[in-house]
Image (spheres, helix red, strand yellow):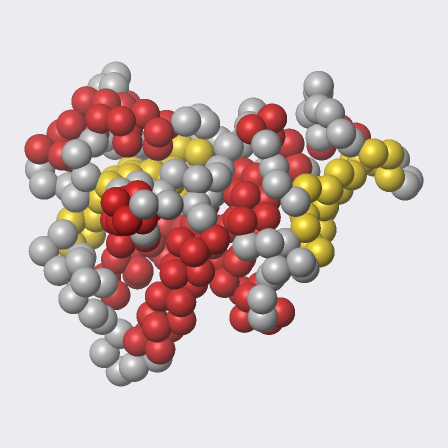
Amino acid sequence: MTASTERLTTPAHRRHVLDLDDFSRSEIEAILETSDSMREILSREIKQVPALRGKTVVNMFFEDSTRTRISFELAARALSANIVNFSARGSSVEKGESLLDTMRTLQALGADVLVVRHSYAGVPYVLARHFRGSVINAGDGRHAHPTQALLDLFTLREKLGSLDKRRVVIVGDIVHSRVARSNLWGLTAMGAQVTLCAPLPCWGANRTGWQPGPPCGLSTTWKQPSKMLMP
């Protein structure tokens, strides 16, 4: 890796967070180490640092949310950002305004970061192609939830230490789980071996590499996932 490439791929220079499929192990480790520092800051009486002072973060939530929206709002406040909470209900979206026009309006009003949750997969990617600032995916359809996966990695690392060569089993409705997909990318990047396990209806059609598992389900194991996991 050249020095110029390294500068582009370090977390400090990453423009968007859309999923963990293009994150390197060193990037994830740097994020987790930064999170360690932030946890210490959040234990202080004044829980704030000036990292995003003067920046405006807009939470664009097209799905109902409690924990994720409030978590992003509190995190932005801890970094001294200005916060705007956008909801599709009561906005011009209900009158037929397009997603891109809504984004352009927010951009013209000074938004620097868009935190986007949407029921359709790929929406954050579309916005990232047109928005001049940064886009963070807070969950898009069945596709991805990278920030939840990063939180899961942080917790596992805290409890288990290194994730290298750890065996992790994810059990549940895999085909509909955006968190499972992002966890698969993140865990394998950190060196873990991941097994997905689910009842037959929760796999989806036309998947390859599945092995029968009792009593009536399927499981498969990855060290390096492939794009076939994308819906």
Residue drawn at the location 67% of the way across and 58% of the way down:
165
User: For the point 86% across and 34% down, which residue is it?
Assistant: 212
Q: Is 36 situated above or below 71?
A: below
The residue nearer to you, when weighing 202 against 34, is: 34
Residue 195: where, in percent of width, then height?
72, 46
Return the x and y of residue 146 as percentages of the image width and height. Answer: 45, 45
Name of the residue lying farthest toward the front: 2
Q: Residue 157: which quarter of the image?
A: bottom right
Residue lying at 55% horizontally and 54% vertically, measured from the top left: 190
Q: Residue furthest right?
A: 215
Q: Is residue 67 visible?
A: no
154 relative to 188 in the view: left or right: left
The residue at 13%/29% (across/down) is: 105
Question: Residue 175, located in which quarter of the rendered image?
Answer: top right
Residue 194 in view = yes
Measured as percent of width and height from the top left, residue 186 is found at 53, 49
Residue 20 versus residue 120: which sits nearer the camera? 20
Quarter of the image with the C terminus is: top right
In the image, taking residue 109 as reference, residue 100 lies left or right, namely right
| Side (left or right) of 156 relative to 27 | right
Q: Give the position of the N terminus as an image quadrant.
A: top left
Q: Establish if 64 lies above or below 37.
A: above
212 left or right of 34 in image: right
User: Along the line of sight, which residue is nearer the eye, 134 or 91?
Assistant: 134
Front-most of residues 162 and 73: 162
Question: Hey, which quadrant is residue 32 in on the image?
Answer: bottom left
Which x, y percent locates residue 131? 20, 31
